[in-house]
Amino acid sequence: GISHVLKTHAQWMVSAGIDYIVFDGTNTGAWPSVYSDIYLVRIVEVLFEEWSTLRAQGVHTPQIAVWCKIDPGSKVWEILLQRVYNDKRFNSLVAKDAKTGKKMFFIKA
């Protein structure tokens, strides 16, 4: 299932020395739409949920950053901030800048 796949991928990445991954969501549509929800928001949520569970079990995972585009009127970035970046359960998973400690969130305008 998805849990096994995400665990295996996390272990491979950690073994390869990967500290964080960037989820590329630059090809999704504006929010709200079925595409932005199914192909970006929910996938990011599941990745954070699964890796958070793994970390609670003592399994190391890379941190996660998101890269999305901002179309006029799009709320995708706000939804990701609300549902993932500002969720305290995922604080240790959000990739942070090594110098400032600020959360990394990439925007394609």
Image: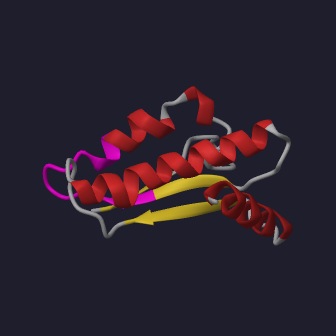
Residue that lies at the very extreme toward the left in this rendered image: 73
Q: Position of residue 18 (x, y in %)?
A: 75, 66
Q: Quadrant of the N terminus?
A: bottom right
Residue 67 locus on image (x, y percent): 43, 60
Residue lying at 71% horizontally and 59% vertically, measured from the top left:
4
Residue 27 in the image, given as x and y percentages of width and height: 31, 70
Per the rendered image, the range of residues in magenta is: 67-78
The quarter of the picture where the C terminus appears is bottom left
Which is more toward the observer, 106 or 29? 29
Query: Image point 82% across, 72% down: which residue?
Result: 16
The reply to whether residue 86 is in sight is: yes
Q: Quadrant of residue 39?
A: bottom left
Residue 25, percent from left and from top: 39, 63
* Residue 107 visible here: no
Figure check: 13 above or below 64: below
Q: Tell me which residue sits at (67%, 41%) in the image.
A: 52
Q: Which one is nearer the viewer's eye here, 54 or 60?
A: 54
Which residue occupies 32% across, 40% down? 78
Q: Is residue 69 magenta?
A: yes
In the rendered view, would you say 38 is above or below 83? below
